[in-house]
Image: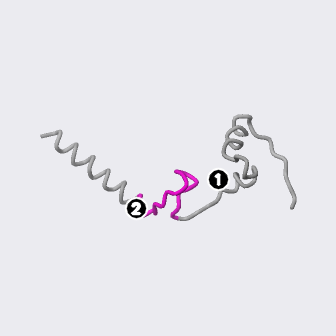
Amino acid sequence: MSSKTISIKESAYDRLKALKGNDKSFSDVILELTETKTNNFDNIIGKGIDTSTEELEEMRDRTEDDDEREALLRRH
């Protein structure tokens, strides 16, 4: 397997090292963080969260509807 050398800020290194632990390589961590998944937001909001795009859109719509209702009630 070939390898590449990259330069990163020390703060980025510290974060990667914290995520790495003793059981992963830096490459493993970078691959996990940059993995593209459709309808899966593990790399954004955390492991073990199983929320689809449709569910997030529904929650957003529900929140916007709630905001509109609250604004209407406050006017009266």
Q: Position of residue 9 (x, y in %)?
A: 74, 36
Q: How is the image coloured?
A: one colour
Question: Where does the magenta region start and end?
Answer: 39-56
**Quick one: 21 or 56, which is closer to the camera?**
21
| Mark 1 residue element | helix
Residue 50: mark: none
Classify residue 65 as left or right of residue 38. Answer: left
Q: Quadrant of the N terminus?
A: bottom right
Q: Position of residue 53 (x, y in %)?
A: 45, 62
Residue in the picture at 73% in, 39% down? 13
Q: Residue furthest top?
A: 10
Q: Position of residue 20 (x, y in %)?
A: 70, 47
Residue 76 occupies which quadrant of the picture?
top left
Residue shown at 87% from the left, 59% from the top? 2
Q: Are marks 2 and 1 in contact (CB under 8 Å)?
A: no
Mark identifier at residue 55: 2
Comes first in the chain, label 2 or label 1 = 1
Does the segment drawn in magenta span residue 73?
Answer: no
Dot 2, how many residues are within 10 Å of its Cα: few (below 14), some (14-19), or many (20+)?
few
User: Which residue: 27% across, 46% down?
Assistant: 67
Tell whether position 47 is magenta. Answer: yes
- Comparing 22 with 53, the one in front is 22
Identify residue type, mark 1.
Leu
* Tag 1 residue: 33
Dot 2: element: helix
Q: Nearer the viewer, residue 25 or 23?
A: 23
Specify few, some or many for label 1: CA neighbours under 10 Å numbering under 14, 14-19, or 20 or more. Answer: some
Quarter of the figure with residue 35: bottom right
**Residue at coordinates 48% horizontally, 61% vertically from top-left?**
50
Could you tell me the amino acid type at mark 2? Answer: Glu
